[in-house]
């Protein structure tokens, strides 16, 4: 972390991710984290624990955990599988986030896919095809469900346009929720794949040409899929990153649910910091909806669209107490207050 020992850690690494940290005594990690921060007080240390890690972070001195339990599991249940309504999704994320100290909540590593799971795009392709084996985690990374090695029904094809719309919704929530978003390499470029070894395929680059995917494991059949760098999706992820970097409210702001409409399958929430407010609306429904979003008195400002998941027809109006929106199917929008 300070490779030349000059007391300046800027030429070293910024942090560590510790695999299966719960298999090592907690006292070791307390001493280890203390040593790391003696070299770089700003170091970011992340433990890999798939359940509630609040006490492990506190007692071991970690900055955060890979937030499978508090983020990836509920996101799969709501946005990917469409298996729970917005109100239940809100209950899960708020209940699990509240188990952590307030400062820790903003450092939690909010990821969807990783080297240990099937890729986000393939999670979406395979969503809702069978009853859950482990409903408490929405079969997130359940071995018999995430790879054609273990089931003939796992679909290894490229995602279609509808499934990409859902991926954009997931990415929007990931970049606007409380915590630190982590994107697994290639997800932003359109890569898909099952669990090991498909999730570790070489990166798809913009300046290279690739052969189509034709093969499937164990003699299973599949369509021939062209493999290319998805420039449109990549630019969308870039716009989300730019949005987050440009809004303190999205990085450090308070989180407040404004609407959790189970009938329309719409979720709206705000992030606020200081005088800055951002409103995020997610429509997980297959239909466009007109939705009224009541605004608490402190949020009654004038808003405009800062970002849409897709360039679809939409409408933004407001009265003195609410936003009046027309939100396209499987789409989301971000609204920021108009500068006076």
Image: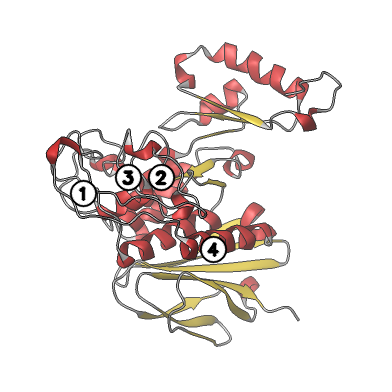
Separation of marks 1 and 4 at Cα, in angstroms: 27 Å
Which numbered tag is attached to residue 72? 2
In three-dimensional space, the C-alpha distance between marks 1 and 2, rounded to whole angstroms, equals: 21 Å
Counting from the top left corner in percent of width and height, residue 241 is at 60, 57
> Which of label 2 and label 3 is nearer to you?
3
Q: Residues within 10 Å of mark 4 (few under 14, many from 20)?
A: few
Labels 1 and 4: the sequence-earlier one: 1
In the structure shown, which secondary structural element does the residue marked by tag 1 occupy?
Answer: loop
Q: Nearer the viewer, residue 92 or 71?
A: 71
Quadrant of the rendering where the N terminus is positioned: top right
Dot placed on the residue nearer the N-terminal end, 4 or 3: 3
**Left or right of 131: which side holds 6?**
right
In percent of the image, x 79 and y 28: which residue is there? Answer: 9
Q: Quadrant of residue 287?
A: bottom left
- Earlier sequence position, callout 1 versus callout 2: 2
For the residues labelled 2 and 3, the Cα–Cα distance comes to 17 Å
The residue where tag 4 is placed is: 235
Mark seen at residue 193: 3
Q: First in sequence: mark 3 or mark 1?
A: 1
Residue 155 badge: 1
Q: Quadrant of the C terminus?
A: bottom right
Image x and y of residue 166, in percent: 36, 62
Residue 82 location (% of width, % of height): 28, 58
Most foreground residue, 60 or 216: 216
Q: Which-is-in-front pick, marks 2 and 4?
A: 4
**Dot 1: within a 10 Å radius of its alpha carbon, few (fewer than 14), some, or many (20 or more) residues?**
many
């Amino acid at each position: 972390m300070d490779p030349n020992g000059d007391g300046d850690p800027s030429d070293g690494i910024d942090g560590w991710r510790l695999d299966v940290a719960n298999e090592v005594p907690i006292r070791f990690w307390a001493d280890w984290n203390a040593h790391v921060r003696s070299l770089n007080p700003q170091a970011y240390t992340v433990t890999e624990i798939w359940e509630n890690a609040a006490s492990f972070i506190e007692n071991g001195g970690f900055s955060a955990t890979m937030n499978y339990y508090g983020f990836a599991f509920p996101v799969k249940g709501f946005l990917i599988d469409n298996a729970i309504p917005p109100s239940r999704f809100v209950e899960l994320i708020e209940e699990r986030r509240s188990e952590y100290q307030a400062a820790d909540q903003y450092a939690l590593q909010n990821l969807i896919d990783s080297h240990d799971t099937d890729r986000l795009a393939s999670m979406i392709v395979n969503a809702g095809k069978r009853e859950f084996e482990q409903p408490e985690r929405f079969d997130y990374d359940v071995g018999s469900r995430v790879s054609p090695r273990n089931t003939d029904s796992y679909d290894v094809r490229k995602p279609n346009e509808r499934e990409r719309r859902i991926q954009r919704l997931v990415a929007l929530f990931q970049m606007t929720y409380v915590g630190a978003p982590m994107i697994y390499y290639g997800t932003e470029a359109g890569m898909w794949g099952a669990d090991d070894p498909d999730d570790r395929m070489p990166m798809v680059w913009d300046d290279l040409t690739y052969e189509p995917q034709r093969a499937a494991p164990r003699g299973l059949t599949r369509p021939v899929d062209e493999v290319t760098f998805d420039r449109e999706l990549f630019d969308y992820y870039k716009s989300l990153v730019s949005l987050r970097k440009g809004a303190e409210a999205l990085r450090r702001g308070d989180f407040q649910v404004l609407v959790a409409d189970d009938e329309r399958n719409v979720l709206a929430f705000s992030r606020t910091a200081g005088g800055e407010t951002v409103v995020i609306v997610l429509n997980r429904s297959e239909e466009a909806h007109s939705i009224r979003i009541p605004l608490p008195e402190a949020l009654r400002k004038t808003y405009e669209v800062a970002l849409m998941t897709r360039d679809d027809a939409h409408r933004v109006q407001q009265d003195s107490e609410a936003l009046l929106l027309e939100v396209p199917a499987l789409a989301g929008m971000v609204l920021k207050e108009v500068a006076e």
